[in-house]
């Protein structure tokens, strides 16, 4: 059996902010509400192909979202229901919606060897001299992210935080006005690799847009990033789409589907 292990936000699904930045044709479908307000969307083309992919192989969402944030996406609870999903940047594996406890225990053990979460939050908060932090948000007890005041946040500050984190065994990823701090030990590919062994997966197609997806993209049998991705800015060595924004998601699922169909035909 094969799998398509893919990041969600800015890869397959998009916020209003992203639609506004890169354009949309108005056919996009709302798939997530927060406090009654629409917050994320999918292209109908992407949805239809993804549905087919989920029937042909394992479609494994691999997201930095917390468990709660992942479950809020109606699409993956109702229309396309993946058997496995990876949340919390690899910290949690969900099997039919339930936490795979052995994996969580394994991750907690690994995290013992990393700079503790509380210590990282303290160090980062201590640098908030000009009030560029709007909020500090927890991530399932394993990581955290900041909501930034982007007007007050500078590229120099970002570099400073990246160096500080790197030194302490953490990594940062800037996604719009959210700045993620994640222990390096917590990564998406490690969780996918575990599923590969457990499920005996052969080919794993992967996609993602951020620095946090780099390992996922490079370790997959075939990995691709959307043109607008943070990961593409960081390195040129990735397969990437021709277009940016929601259109990129269509290219991603189309390229994955045509690849596995081709491979299947040759066998
Ligand atoms: Mg993403």
Image (tube, rainbow, N blue to C red):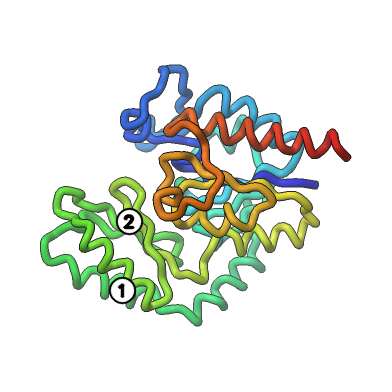
Q: Nearer the viewer, residue 214 or 17?
A: 214
Q: Earlier in the sequence, mark 1 or mark 2?
A: 1
Q: Nearer the viewer, residue 25 or 237?
A: 237
Percent of width and height locating residue 139: 42, 60
How crowded is the residue under tag 1: few (<14 C-alpha within 10 Å), some, or many (20+)? some
- Nearest to the eye among marks 1 and 2: give it: 1
Residue found at the far top of this picture: 26
Which residue sits at x=65%, y=53%?
220
Q: Quadrant of residue 26?
A: top left
Q: Is residue 103 left or right of residue 127?
A: right
Q: Which mark is residue 63?
A: none
Vertical order, 109 against 253 (above or below): below
Residue found at the far right of this picture: 267
Q: Is residue 72 visible?
A: no
Find numbered disc 2 in the image and state the secondary structure of the residue it sits on. Answer: strand
Q: Is residue 83 left or right of residue 183?
A: right
Percent of width and height locating residue 108: 54, 73
Residue at numbered disc 2: 179
Which residue sits at x=53%, y=63%?
187
Q: Quadrant of residue 129?
A: bottom left
Vertical order, 32 against 200 (above or below): above
CB atoms of marks 1 and 2 within 8 Å: no
Q: Is residue 23 visible?
A: yes
Find numbered disc 1 in the image and state the secondary structure of the residue it sits on. Answer: helix
Q: Quadrant of residue 264?
A: top right
Which residue sits at x=60%, y=72%?
105
Q: How many marks?
A: 2
Residue at numbered disc 1: 164
């Amino acid at each position: 059996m094969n799998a398509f292990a893919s990041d969600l936000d800015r890869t397959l699904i998009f916020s209003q902010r992203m639609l506004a930045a890169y354009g949309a044709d108005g056919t996009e479908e709302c798939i997530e509400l927060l406090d009654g307000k629409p917050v994320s969307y999918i292209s109908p083309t992407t949805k239809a192909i993804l549905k087919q992919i989920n029937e042909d192989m394992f479609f494994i969402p691999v997201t930095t979202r917390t468990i709660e944030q992942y479950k809020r996406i109606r699409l993956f609870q109702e229309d396309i229901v993946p058997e496995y999903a990876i949340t919390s940047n690899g910290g949690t594996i969900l099997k039919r919606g339930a936490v795979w406890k052995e994996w969580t225990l394994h991750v907690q053990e690994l995290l013992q060897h990393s700079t503790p979460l509380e210590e990282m939050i303290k160090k980062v908060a201590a640098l908030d001299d000009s009030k560029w932090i709007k909020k500090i948000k927890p991530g399932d007890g394993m990581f955290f992210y900041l909501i930034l005041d982007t007007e007050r946040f500078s590229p120099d500050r970002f570099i400073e935080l990246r160096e500080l984190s790197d030194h302490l065994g953490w990594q940062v990823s800037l996604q719009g006005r959210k700045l993620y701090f994640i222990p390096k030990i917590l990564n998406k590919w490690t969780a996918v690799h575990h599923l590969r062994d457990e499920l005996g997966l052969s080919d794993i197609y992967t996609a993602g847009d951020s620095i946090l997806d780099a390992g996922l993209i490079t370790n997959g049998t075939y990995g691709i990033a959307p043109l607008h991705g943070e990961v593409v800015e960081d390195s040129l060595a990735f397969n990437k789409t021709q277009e940016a924004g929601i259109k990129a998601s269509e290219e991603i699922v189309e390229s994955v589907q045509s690849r596995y169909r081709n491979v299947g035909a040759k066998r």
